[in-house]
Image (tube, grey):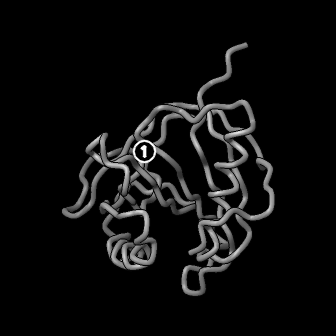
Amino acid sequence: MSDQPVTSIAPDRFVSGKTMLFVGTRRYCRFEEHAGIGSLWHAFGALLGSITYTIPGAAFGLYLAPVDPGDEVGFVYAPAVEDSRLSDLPEGLSGIGIAPRAWVVFRHAGHVSDLGATCAAAREWLAVSGRQPADCAMQMIERYRPEFASGSGNGGCDVWIPVAAQVA
């Protein structure tokens, strides 16, 4: 996965988010280990039938800050689905709640292996936009729509980045 930005990118939209509840698996990854994320999705797929309160319509890749705030070489990745409640979770799955916040959303239309370039361009846009990233554990969300073809990696996704609310 290339982390070199695409030439330029503009946000698709801004979202004032609601509380979101997710159920997924988690694993610590180093930034250079993106290739291992596919195997996390494969393992998560085998657990999908055991999640009771799934909200249909999308799958999500959650990028969380590492537990150690001094860790600058990695992140926690969680393939997940949105859930209506975080109860009765089967073994191997964990609940992740996200408080309401503002998001800037970028559309990634290409193959999943090129997602890093879209994320890098989004970070560049954020750096010159006057907006500030939100100070929170959730660093980014990949939102995969139903048309995403997990077998081929085609179909694109939306990249959600939390931003600090603008002061009027």
Farthest residue, direction left = 91
- Give the percent coordinates (x, y) of residue 73: 37, 56
Left or right, 9 with reference to 140: right
Instruction: State the count of labels.
Output: 1
- Give the percent coordinates (x, y) of residue 57: 59, 60
Taking the spot 57% from the left edge, 35% from the top edge, the residue there is 133
Farthest residue, direction bottom = 152
Badge 1 marks a residue whose secondary structure is: strand
Taking the spot 48% from the left edge, 46% from the top edge, the residue there is 139
Question: Relative to the observer, which residue lies in front, 72 or 82?
Answer: 72
- Give the percent coordinates (x, y) of residue 159: 63, 55
**Where's the C terminus, which quadrant?**
top right
**Residue position marked by numbered label 1 in the rendering:** 21
Question: Relative to the observer, which residue lies in front, 129 or 43?
Answer: 129
When asked about the image quadrant of residue 144, the answer is: bottom right
- Tag 1: residue type? Leu
Left or right, 49 with reference to 8: left
Question: Relative to the observer, which residue lies in front, 93 or 132?
Answer: 132
Farthest residue, direction top = 168
How many C-alpha atoms fall within 10 Å of the one at disc 1: few (<14), some, or many (≥20)?
Answer: some
Taking the spot 60% from the left edge, 80% from the top edge, the residue there is 153
Left or right, 99 with reference to 5: left
Question: Relative to the observer, which residue lies in front, 80 or 55?
Answer: 80
When asked about the image quadrant of residue 18, the answer is: top right
Taking the spot 44% from the left edge, 35% from the top edge, the residue there is 136
**Where's the N terminus, which quadrant?**
bottom right
- Give the percent coordinates (x, y) of residue 56: 53, 60
Left or right, 22 with reference to 155: left
Compared with 160, 43 (above or below) is below
